[in-house]
Every structure is written in C-alpha cells, then in structure tokens.
Image (cartoon, rainbow, N blue to C red):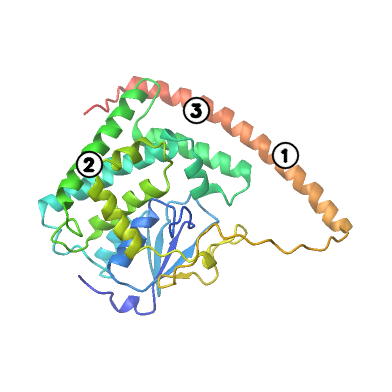
Amino acid sequence: MEQMSGRGEEGLTLIARKPCFNLPTGCPDCLPVYIYLKLANLHFHLDFNLIYPESDIIPYVETGNYVAYNNERGGVIECLRQDGILDLDTEFLSVPEWVSANSMVSSWLADAVMYELWLGTDGGSAQKVYYSDLPWPIGKVLYFKKVHFAKLQLGIDKENAERREEQIYRNANLAYGALSTRLGDQNFLFENRPSSLDALVLGHLLFTLQVLPETSVLRSKLLEHSNLVRYAEKCMTELIEVDTSSLPSSSSARSSSGASSSAPRRGPYNWSSKPKSKQKKEKTEEEKTFKRRGKYFVGAQVVAVLLFLTLMGRGDDAEMELDDDEGYDYSE
C-alpha cells in the first residue's frame, strides 16, 4: 500500500452528502470513498455539502491545493491512486479475477442501486439522502429530474421496463453469488488484505442494508448471502463512525469544522429532550413583509414545478419515440 505523498501532509478532507440512516453519509457514491480512507487507516476529516446535492462532483477530496472530484478520471478513488496520493490496489491491477470483479461491482451492482433508489422503491430513501434539506418544490423537481435521468441511464422505456427490471435483479443476484463465493470466510475479498474493491463492495452492502427499505427486492436478495451480511456487519462495527454532534443542520451549506474520522461514537438517535420554550415577540413590519414575499416565492415555485413536469412529460414521449426508432436492445 502506498502512503500519502507530501501533498497530503496538510491533512485530508472528504466532502460528502449528509449523514443519515445511521451512516456517516447516506450517499451510495460517498460511502465507498469513506470506507476506502478508513481501510487505509488514514486520518481524515468528513465535511458536508448541502447546497448542491445533485452535483456529480460529490464526493470530492481536498488536501492542500489538491482536489479529486467524483466526475473526473473514474472517480475519487481512481484519482487518488493515479496521482500517488493513496493506493491500495498496486498488487491487484494485474490480477484478472480482481479486475473482472471490480467491473461487475461497478456495473451490475451500481445499476441495481440506481434502479432501486430512483425506480424500484417509493423514493423515500432518495428524498432523505439528497433533497430533504431543500425547499419542497425544488426537491421534487430535482427528484423527478433524477428519475428521468435514471431511466435513460438504465435504458428503460415503456416497452422494456419489465424485462430490464428482471435483468437488473438477475445480474445483481449473480454478482452477490460470485462475491459470496469469493469472500468465503475471509476478512477481505483478495489475499486477505483490503483494496478499493472491498471499499466498493462494503459501501454497496451497507447502503443496501441500511438505506433501502425492508420491502426492497435488492435487499432481500442480499440477505440470502449470510457471509456478505457478516462482512458488512464487521465493517459497520470496526470502521463506521457516526458523531451525532456533527450532523449538519438544514440551514448550513457545508459544516464549518467537519467531523473528524476519529470522532467517538455517541448515544442512540432516539434520545429525546424537550426544547426550551421561546418567548413570543411581536412581529415587526419588515418581518410581515418578508413573510408575504415568502408566500409569493413559494407560489412561484409551485407554478414552476407544474410547468417543469408538463414539459418533462412531453419530453419523455418524444424520447420514447426516438428510442423505438433507434431500436436499442438491452437484452443480454
């Protein structure tokens, strides 16, 4: 394993989507990066970006003047490896079985998570992970936009929806079977030492078990493989740390100090305390004016949402016609 180069000596910060579902971040893209850094026994800080939950640059890593974005060169982990910042994979890059397993996780299981998160469930998990800190109309627009994007990415249209669903779950089940056989009773997937493949798989497993609802088809398929579940539970116990005192507030754009990766665990989330009552004060004329303007703004957002959904519906029909004309075939 290569250690961090001189550029990383100033300290490293992982910027992710917010923590939820008893995880340090509920994002399926951010969680593997978090686990990768933890597998490397690297001290880092965890920070949160709540302004642009839809941005494809999240997650990203900062250290000194260096930044590695999710949408560059295969993602954050690959950027860290290529740039000599952190590499757990040097010994595995020439191993065909490792390469094929990595490809399977990055395609089949990634597709399954995308389908479940945006199309296969009621959308409650996606709303909480991505949009719960945004005003309701904006969150709804971004959610429907992502649903539309997921259909395009997965090649789903009105004609092949059922067939594609079956194929996605079949591929995921094959992937679980292969990973379960590969893992056996070992601590890691290859040579009993961690690699980015372990980070990808563990991130997927924890997301599936913690974030997806109990009615999830993907979750039920994963539960059939007891050693994969134990693998995830071990990671949850030894690597995952959630500091409830550092959870970002809905009004913050990005936490000011971040959450240290070495922060101690805190008590359960269901601890309750009665908030202190505040004395009522008479509203000023300025506050009343601001409240009226706020109502007008919300009304304008609702109109914008309705207009967006109308236009998007027309766009869907047009794109479906184009798909039919092009004759794409997504069968195996």
Image location of residue 275, percent across then percent down: 69, 62
The picture quadrant where one finds residue 277 is bottom right
Amino acid carrying mark 3 in the image: Gly
Left or right relative to 247: residue 4:
left
Mark 1 or mark 3, whichever is nearer to me? 1
Q: How many neighbours does mark 1 have within 10 angstroms: few (below 14), some (14-19), or many (20 or more)?
A: few
Residue position marked by numbered label 2 in the rendering: 175
Amino acid carrying mark 2 in the image: Ala
Question: Which residue is found at the position 51% from the left and 41% from the top?
Answer: 124
Residue position marked by numbered label 3 in the rendering: 315
Q: How many neighbours does mark 3 have within 10 angstroms: few (below 14), some (14-19), or many (20 or more)?
A: few
Image location of residue 331, percent across then percent down: 24, 26
Q: Are marks 3 and 2 in contact (CB under 8 Å)?
A: no
Residue position marked by numbered label 1 in the rendering: 299
Left or right relative to 236: residue 225:
left
Q: Are marks 1 and 3 in contact (CB under 8 Å)?
A: no
Distance in Å between CA atoms under marks 2 and 1: 47 Å
Q: How many neighbours does mark 2 have within 10 angstroms: few (below 14), some (14-19), or many (20 or more)?
A: some
Mark 3 or mark 2, whichever is nearer to me? 2
Question: Which residue is found at the position 25% from the left and 70% from the top?
Answer: 84
Q: Is residue 76 visible?
A: no
Question: Which residue is found at the position 33% from the left and 38% from the top?
Answer: 220
